Structure formats: C-alpha cells, structure tokens
C-alpha cells in the first residue's frame, strides 16, 4: 500500500469491490451487446451473422494490446481514471456502432476492446490496495464474476430492448449505463488514485515484452498460457454464437435465446466460485482443470443433438453445464498462475498469460464462424470445440505433474 494512501483514508473494501464489480460487469455487457442481437444487427448491415466472430476478434485485438500496456497506465494515471476511460471508450464504441455500416461496427469493436482491456489490471490494483490479505482470494473471486454477470445482463436486457424498441436504442442504453457508471465512481478518484505517479515515463516496448518474456521462460507458465488459449476459444465461441445458434438452428425467439444465454452465464458465475472452492479443498488446480476439460468436451459433443429434444429444459441443462465449465475455469487458472509464478512476479505473469487468453479470443470466434458457415450448422461447429478440450487434457497429462505445488 502506498504511503500516500493510508488505510484510514481509503474507502471500505466492500465499496471498492462493488465499484470494480460494477465496472467489470458493464464493460463485459458492452462487449457482448452486439453478439446477443447478432441476427438483427447482421440483417441491418446486410452481412452474415457468422461475421460476429470477426467483431469479437477485432474487439479482443484491442483488449490484448490495452491489457499489456495497462500496468504502466494504471501507475501513471490511476486505476479509477483508467477504469473511467475504459467505460468511456466502451460507450463511444457502442455509439459509433449505431450507424448501420460494417466499417463503423469494426471501429466500434476496436474501441470497446481498448476500453475492456485495462479493466482487470486496474481492478486488481484497486482490490490489492483495499483488501485485507486474509480475504484476498474470496474478494478476487467475486470480482471475477463480473464478466459472466455482464454477459447475463446483456442476454436478459439487450434482446428485449431490441425487440420492443430498436437495436440502435439497445446499444444506446448500454452506452449510457457505461457513462453513468464512470460518473458514479468519480468520488473514489481522490483516495484510490492518490498513489499514481505523474512523473512515471511510459515505455511501450517494456510493457509489451516483459510479461511475455517471463511467461515463455518458465515452462509451467507457458503450459498455463497455452491452456488459457484453448479454454478461451471454447468460452468465447460459446458466448458469441449461442444466441445465433439457438435462433438459427433451434428456431428460438431472440428473447428466449437471450434468456438461455443469461442462464448459461449465471452457471458460469456459480462455476467460478464453486470450482475454485473444490480445487482448494479437494482436487487441486491441475485435477480441477482436467475435470473442466472433460465437461467442456462432453458438452461440445452433445450440443449438436439438442434439436432432437423437444424440450427447453434439456437445452438449459446442457448449456448450463457448458457455461459453468467453459466460463468457470478462469479463477482456478489464475490461482495456478499465481502459484507457479516466480516470487513477487504474479501480476507480471498474469498479464503475460492473459495476452494468450485474449489471443485465443481473437482467433477462436472467427474460426468458429468459418466452420459454422462451411458445415452449415452452428451445432456441428460446437462439436469441434472438443478438439481444444482434448489438447488441454494432453497438456495437463504431459506437464501437470511437474507443476510446483503451493
């Protein structure tokens, strides 16, 4: 903790947690706003809904770059100010995307990605500053639920707004929410950003290279980075195309499909908490990641057959299990990264492996969209996600036993 920010002057850790959770949820909601109404937006743009994968890829290219640079930005300008800037960039990206033109949609995706990237490093800085050591794991786990929570909000709110008003109004609503959140957290700037170093010089080269150099010089971290690359392909492919799959392949309405997405996201929220507890108390991180790989692979192979069951309950159960594993792996993975990182370098290792996570997001959804277009079925494309799950199992079998025990 900075000497310039004595603990007596800091807001309560509960308030900081709520603020970071709100910011994380809203940027996640902004990122998934267009994907959850992809069929409607694609019709307005006169493009295929499968191109939503390219939208996500462009967004995460921005996020990957911004996340690597965010460490220096947070130290220079303050974590709250970086969070506010991220929210503003997301709002601007949504605003630009309102114009029904593929070029503006791409520009909007890039801006949303640039806004999304710094949020996790900024919130980690804030929580480390305000949270007692004995509550750190739980508090960070709660904060991590902001991503599926934001996706769930997108699934519940955005399709309904688009149905009853217009898709442009839905984008505008989420943009306004981002700006309101940025304004609401402004009072926290004075105390939580008091540790910023306005004399700090920003080095783009150092910020980009150092985290990657650390990760690829330590085999356990390299393996974990590759695991996150595979897991993120499954996670974002599932989330990006779920509404389109349910609407196009299973003939669900956008509203019903959005509700199913929200349920899967809720399962992801629960999964992040439950799998972390099970890993800590019973299985350990490596065995827990093996179990999650198996569940992802099984759900991927079952999903193409959902159309054979004339009941919404089966679809909800399968996609909830899919969501709990494909979304819920992050907490277990991040804990293992911290365990395998050299002493005092957990944050640098996290930033480096996170870049590989984002790379999986950049490459996965467009590849998934290409497969779906080639096969003529989103369900069959989901079956191919058994491939990255199998590769995860191989990596864990081959290198997992050599991981340093915490």
Image (cartoon, rainbow, N blue to C red):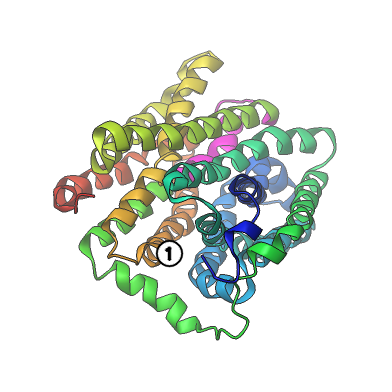
| Front in this rendered view, residue 196 or 85 | 196
Residue 304 x, y percent position in the rendering: 43, 29
Residue 73 x, y percent position in the rendering: 58, 74
User: Residue 34 magenta-drawn?
Assistant: no
Estimate how packed mark 1 is, as few (under 14), some (14 to 19) or many (20 or more) residues with alpha carbons within 10 Å: many
Residue at 28% in and 60% down: 221
Q: Quadrant of residue 292?
A: top left
Up the image or down, 394 lies above or below 95; here it is: above
Left or right placement of residue 240 versus residue 109 in this view = left
Q: Circle 1 sits in a helix, a strand or a loop, which is it?
A: helix
Query: Is there any visible trace of residue 373 in the rendered image?
Result: no
Residue 157 x, y percent position in the rendering: 72, 35
Residue at 52% in and 22% down: 316
The single residue placed furthest to the right in the displayed view is: 165
The single residue placed furthest to the top in the displayed view is: 310
| Boundaries of the magenta span | 233-254
Left or right placement of residue 111 versus residue 168 in this view = left
Residue at 65% in and 44% down: 38
Question: Which residue is the site of mark 1?
Answer: 351
Up the image or down, 351 lies above or below 200; here it is: above
Q: Identify the main secondary structure in magenta.
A: helix
Left or right placement of residue 348 versus residue 143 in this view = left
| Front in this rendered view, residue 84 or 344 | 344
Q: Quadrant of residue 112?
A: bottom right
| Front in this rendered view, residue 36 or 126 | 126
Residue at 56% in and 58% down: 126
Residue 269 x, y percent position in the rendering: 51, 35
């Amino acid at each position: 903790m900075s000497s310039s920010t004595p603990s007596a002057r800091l807001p309560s850790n509960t308030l900081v947690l709520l603020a970071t959770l709100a910011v994380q949820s809203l940027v996640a909601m902004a990122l998934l706003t267009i994907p959850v109404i992809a069929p409607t937006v694609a019709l307005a743009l006169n493009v295929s809904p499968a191109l939503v994968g390219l939208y996500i890829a462009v967004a995460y290219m921005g996020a990957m770059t911004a996340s690597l640079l965010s460490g220096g930005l947070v130290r220079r300008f303050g974590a709250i100010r970086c969070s506010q800037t991220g929210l503003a960039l997301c709002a601007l990206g949504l605003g630009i995307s309102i114009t029904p033109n593929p070029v503006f949609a791409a520009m909007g995706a890039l801006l949303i990605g640039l806004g999304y990237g710094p949020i996790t490093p900024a919130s980690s800085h804030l929580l480390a500053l305000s949270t007692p050591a004995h509550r750190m794991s739980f508090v960070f786990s709660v904060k991590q639920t902001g991503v599926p929570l934001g996706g769930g909000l997108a699934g519940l709110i955005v399709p309904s707004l688009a149905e009853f008003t217009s898709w442009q109004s839905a984008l505008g609503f989420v943009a306004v929410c981002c700006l309101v959140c940025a304004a609401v957290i402004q009072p926290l700037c004075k105390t939580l950003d008091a540790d910023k170093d306005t004399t700090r010089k920003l080095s783009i080269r150092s910020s980009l290279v150092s985290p990657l150099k650390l990760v690829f010089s330590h085999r356990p971290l390299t393996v974990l980075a590759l695991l996150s690359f595979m897991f993120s392909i499954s996670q974002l492919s599932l989330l990006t195309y779920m509404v389109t799959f349910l609407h196009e392949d299973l003939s669900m309405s956008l509203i019903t499909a959005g509700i199913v997405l929200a349920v899967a996201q809720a399962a992801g929220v629960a999964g992040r908490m439950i799998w972390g507890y099970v890993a800590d108390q019973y299985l350990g991180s490596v065995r827990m990641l093996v179990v999650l790989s198996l569940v992802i692979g099984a759900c991927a192979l079952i999903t193409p057959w959902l159309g054979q069951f004339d009941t919404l309950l089966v679809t909800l159960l399968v996609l909830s299990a899919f969501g709990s594993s494909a979304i819920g792996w992050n907490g277990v993975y991040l804990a293992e990264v911290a365990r395998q990182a050299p002493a005092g370098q957990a944050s640098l290792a996290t930033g480096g492996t996170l870049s590989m996570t984002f790379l999986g997001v950049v490459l996965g959804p467009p590849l998934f969209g290409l497969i779906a277009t080639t096969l003529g079925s989103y369900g069959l494309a989901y079956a191919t996600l058994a491939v990255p799950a199998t590769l995860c199992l191989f990596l864990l079998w081959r290198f997992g036993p050599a991981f340093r025990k915490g």
